[in-house]
């Protein structure tokens, strides 16, 4: 039986860097994935295909915005959807081959296609072959979680696994769930002229994130003609591609929506089925594999990272966890994950970036905070770009003055999130940010302006 120091199951943003880091440590590593290429859901059905299509939609939208800059191009714009999909295919191929090439630099790292299953705490079965290992990392990701809705239509609806494969741009589509996936995709389709409906059971979209940030996007969606329906209780979902019917009640009234296409994005379920976790005593529930702060599962030599765990579900978080898991397996000192520094960007319009704690997170932790805000409506760059929507918010711990969280809502929140991450990770205060020179006129000036505002406010208060 072949034996490795480390077996990594799943070659996404969690598994692939974990395997490469262990190989760099000089360990013998087997990386196994059901697919014949590395990249995971992020590359093939998630982050990258969604951003290729959004990118095309955003550039298409620029034509419509040209009028505000006194440029007349109306009526001439046209998008060649098939060419966009071909671009997407090429980018996916290029990125996957790039990852494969990087792995080939390590003679002690082997990539293999197959479905892995634990048979005991030191052995996995890959399509009938037994492989022995000292340590294992589970990085099998997650897939769309489908609630137990009534009706035959649920199994015919799209999830993120199908939507990027469709060759025709739908004329009309309905999204069930108003979380991260739906919110990114609904605005993308809307910009391309698809009539979009979004049905959500909560009282607002993006219920897991800072309310003020979510409301900016929700209001923009409604303004731009997306049919956003909230406070919904779902009934039967019937039909198939081309003709769905969704029954629901809203404010006590029974309604039916007929829609040719339906996409369900109501959260994720960890890919743990058939992994043999019960056999090896690795605890899990429907939210994912249980790990401690060092990413060790309930089995000493088995770790888990990324979407298959109960924790946050982001590509960069999976990669961050991969580094910590490898360190904890092969280095003498244990490192812990630090959720208080988590950052993410939602590629909505405007974009939302969040780093560290929101005000609500701080309240849950019993941390006394003050919240200071700068509106892009007064910002020079935002005015020049006619992109004044949104704000920058610092969540400041009262006791220490440390900026514990930053939320940004802006057309370019993704670019601004880097500085926000540095501030929160290094536990900086407003004074530290004020000392940083931000070039004029750039959106990064907002950091300096907000820091200045906070500093002057504290001076005024101390004088009173
Ligand atoms: C539409 C969409 C958009 C997203 N956009 C973003 C974004 O912009 N930014 C961001 O940070 N995150 C985004 N995400 C989330 C991101 O895709 C995930 O957080 C990330 O892919 C998690 O990485 P992972 O390595 O844990 O798992 P995955 O990427 O899911 O990889 C898991 C791998 O394990 C393999 N596997 C599963 N079971 C087995 C088995 N038994 N044997 C062998 N192999 C197995 C799978 O084939 C897969 O390749 C998005 C997700 C979706 C759905
Ligand atoms: N830019 C990014 O980083 C990005 C983009 C897309 C997805 N993601 C990741 O993917 C994850 C999954 O996204 P998602 O949109 O599927 O999930 P989500 O958890 O963000 O949203 C799920 C939505 O479905 C609704 N819902 C849940 N159960 C329901 C039920 N039984 N009936 C009716 N409605 C129900 C919820 O109210 C919520 O609005 C996100 O948590 C995020 O981490 C990240």
Image (spheres, rainbow, N blue to C red):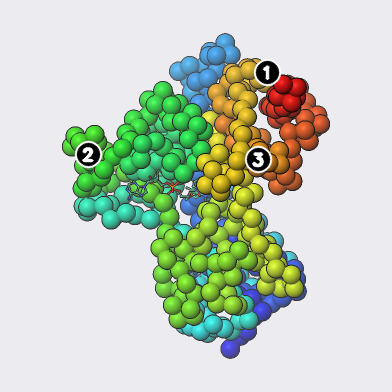
Q: In the rendered view, tell whether residue 159 sits above or below residue 429.
A: below
Which residue appears at 66% of the width and 38% of the height? 398
Left or right of 168 on screen, residue 402 = right
Q: In the rendered view, tell whether residue 187 sits above or below residue 75.
A: below
- Of marks 2 and 3, the one in the foreground: 3
Furthest residue toward left: 254
Q: Circle 1 sits on which residue?
A: 380
Which residue appears at 42% of the width and 66% of the height? 285
Question: Residue 122, position in %: x, y?
Answer: 57, 83
Which circle's residue, 2 or 3, is located before the other in the chain? Answer: 2
Label pair 3/1, CB-CB below 8 angstroms: no
Question: Residue 236, position in %: x, y?
Answer: 21, 48
- Tag on residue 397? 3
Question: On the image, which quarter does residue 461 sit in?
Answer: top right
- Nearer-the-camera pick, 73 or 136: 136
Which residue appears at 66% of the width and 79% of the height? 5
Which residue appears at 38% of the width and 55% of the height? 145
Q: Circle 2 sits on which residue?
A: 249
Q: Is disc 1 surrounded by few (<14), some (14 to 19) or many (20+) residues within 10 Å?
A: some
Quadrant placement of the C terminus: top right
Q: CA distance from mark 3 to mark 1?
A: 29 Å
| Secondary structure category for the residue under label 1 | helix
């Amino acid at each position: 039986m072949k034996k490795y120091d480390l077996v990594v199951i799943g070659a996404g943003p969690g598994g692939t860097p974990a395997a490469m880091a262990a190989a760099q440590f000089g360990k013998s590593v087997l990386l196994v994935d059901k697919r014949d290429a590395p990249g995971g859901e992020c590359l093939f059905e998630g982050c990258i295909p969604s951003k290729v299509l959004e990118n095309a939609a955003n550039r298409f939208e620029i034509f419509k915005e040209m009028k505000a800059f006194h440029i007349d191009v109306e009526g001439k714009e046209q998008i060649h959807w098939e060419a966009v999909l071909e671009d997407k295919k090429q980018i996916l191929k290029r990125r996957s081959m790039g990852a494969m090439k990087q792995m080939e630099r390590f003679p002690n790292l082997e990539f293999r296609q197959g479905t892995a299953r634990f048979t005991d705490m030191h052995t996995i079965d890959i399509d009938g072959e037994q492989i022995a290992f000292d340590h294992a990392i589970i990085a099998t990701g997650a897939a769309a979680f489908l609630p137990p809705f009534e009706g035959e239509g649920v199994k015919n609806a799209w999830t993120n696994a199908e939507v990027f494969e469709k060759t025709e741009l739908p004329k009309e589509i309905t999204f069930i769930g108003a979380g991260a996936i739906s919110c990114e995709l609904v605005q993308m389709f809307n910009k391309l002229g698809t009539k979009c409906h979004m049905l959500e059971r909560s009282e607002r979209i993006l219920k897991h994130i800072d309310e003020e940030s979510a409301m900016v996007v929700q209001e923009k969606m409604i303004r731009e003609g997306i049919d956003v329906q909230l406070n919904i209780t779902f009934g039967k979902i019937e039909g198939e591609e081309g003709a769905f019917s969704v029954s629901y009640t809203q404010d006590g009234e029974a309604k039916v929506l007929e829609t040719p296409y339906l996409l369900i994005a109501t959260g994720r379920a960890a890919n743990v089925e058939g992994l043999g976790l019960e056999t090896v005593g690795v605890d899990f529930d429907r939210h994912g594999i249980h790990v401690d702060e060092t990413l060790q599962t309930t089995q000493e030599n088995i770790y888990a990272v990324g979407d298959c765990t109960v924790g946050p579900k982001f590509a960069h978080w999976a990669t961050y966890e991969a580094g910590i898991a490898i360190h904890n397996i092969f280095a003498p000192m244990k490192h812990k994950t630090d959720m208080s520094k988590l950052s993410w960007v939602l590629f909505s319009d405007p974009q939302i970036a969040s780093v560290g704690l929101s005000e609500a997170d701080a309240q849950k932790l019993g941390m006394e905070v003050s919240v200071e805000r700068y509106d892009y409506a007064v910002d020079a760059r935002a005015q020049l770009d006619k992109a004044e929507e949104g704000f920058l918010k610092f969540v400041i711990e009262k006791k220490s003055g440390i900026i514990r969280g930053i939320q940004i809502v802006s057309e370019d929140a993704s670019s601004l999130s880097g500085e926000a991450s540095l501030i929160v990770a290094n536990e900086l205060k407003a004074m530290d940010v004020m000392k940083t020179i931000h070039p004029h006129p750039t959106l990064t000036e907002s950091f300096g302006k907000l820091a200045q505002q906070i500093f002057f406010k504290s001076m005024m208060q101390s004088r009173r």
